[in-house]
Amino acid sequence: MQLKKENILIVDDDLHILELLHRHLSTWEYHTYKAVSVKEAVQILRDTKIDLLITDLKMPEIDGFELIKFVSEHYPNLPKLVVTGYPSVQDSLAVIKSGVVEYLTKPFTKDELKTAINKSIDSSEKKTPEDIKISTKKDNTYGEIIGASERINEVIQIIERVKDNKATVFIKGESGTGKELVARAIHYQGKFARAPFIAVNCGGIPENLLEAELFGYTKGAFTGAEKERNGFFQAANGGTIFLDEIGNASTAVQSRLLRVLQEKEVVKIGAQKAEKIDVRIIAATNSDLKEMIKKETFREDLYYRLTVVEIDVAPLRERKEDIPLLVKKFLFKYGVEYKDRFIKISPEASEILQRYDWPGNIRELENVIQRAVIMCDKMVNIEHLPYALKRTITFPEEALLSLKEMEIRHIKRVLRATDNNKTKAAEILGIDRKTIRQKLSD
């Protein structure tokens, strides 16, 4: 039986097994990707559409179990086949619980391998849409969106209603809340997923170039236009164009965009003839467009054309129950990237992350975890978090303490944050080392 799928990822630190599997799969005309570590595998998974994962369990640093866990959480519909030379009852039970369909023990025959691959793929193809929805909910992921809060569930419910049509969608939210992830989910979770998805940062392209980049131009339309060129709208034809920071668009761009929405056609700069176009427009901004309308810097008629469906992405401070899930994702991502291992976080550090209000939202959280992973060995502790973040935390249980007790607690907290470096702690506190000893011994 010839499989319908094409891309198979093989993960094994044994180069001989890796080459053997590659050779077998090549004879069956599959396109294979090879990785000798979980770190390499994760990078391939992020950049490539993989149809089947074949992985060993026993590998140095991060093992195959962590890879299976990562795939189950982030790619719940990807079938997994385990090939290992160290079978055990415990391993077998753990693999079965993780959702792996097939478990192949080394050495194996070519026919056994083919049978296991067929079974893994067949099982994946028999999944119903309901199975997929249950799996997605269980893993607290939807596309690239991670969260289990009510606010995130509201966003996902709207996405479910708009993903299979081409209604214009407007996404609003503070900077760093993940507006582009929502746009990508609308596109890739729906029936137009195989069509183009073009993301354009309107704030990142100079105003005098944005119009030409979006709509294209003819030869000689302006100085430097040496040949005719399509724009982002033509590139997105049949699919989705995501216009981020739409509030930065000039009056000229707004007028052309209004025509696209009204007439479903694009006119290149310098052209007389319009081109029909079939594209879904998703726009986003962290600006107050209604305020811009009052100041006459944004067209009111365009605003209403863009906001057929509105999605409000809540800031992280309003959905703090999602913080542990996001922290887990970033710990794995940067642990693999920088340390070749799975990094954990202490309960004390985790508590501080959940108490903080995150004015920079998910982007700020990711940056904090990235830095903490670099600074730690195997576990993120309080001392690996930025001092500015720890300083802003207010502990409610301290509200009724005496000033002396609060002072002692604060000194101890600074000592923990500086890894018990009394000189550095004294510098932060604005006192000398002797005073620290006296206050702690009183």
Image (cartoon, rainbow, N blue to C red):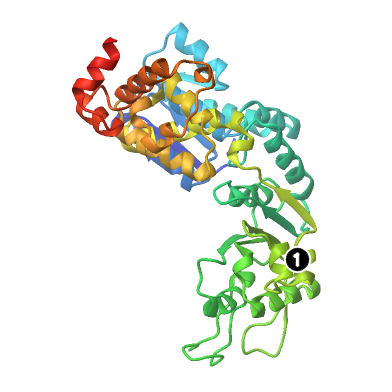
Q: Residues within 10 Å of mark 1 (few under 14, many from 20)?
A: some
Answer with left or right where residue 269 lies relative to residue 410: right
Residue 398, can we see it? yes
Query: Closer to the camera, 5 or 322?
Result: 322
Answer with left or right where residue 408 lies relative to residue 287: left
Q: Position of residue 332 (x, y in %)?
A: 43, 31
Q: Amino acid at mark 1?
A: Tyr
Outermost residue toward the top in this view: 89
Image quarter for residue 217? Answer: bottom right
Say which residue appears at 74% left-offset and 35% top-offset: 129
Q: Quadrant of the N terminus?
A: top right
Q: Position of residue 334 (x, y in %)?
A: 39, 36
Q: Does 73 appear above or below 232?
A: above
Q: Position of residue 168 (x, y in %)?
A: 75, 60
Q: Quadrant of the C terminus?
A: top left
Residue 114, can we see it? no
Say which residue appears at 64% left-offset and 52% top-offset: 183
Q: Which residue is mark 1?
A: 303
Say which residue appears at 80% left-offset and 58% top-offset: 308
Q: Position of residue 214 (x, y in %)?
A: 60, 73
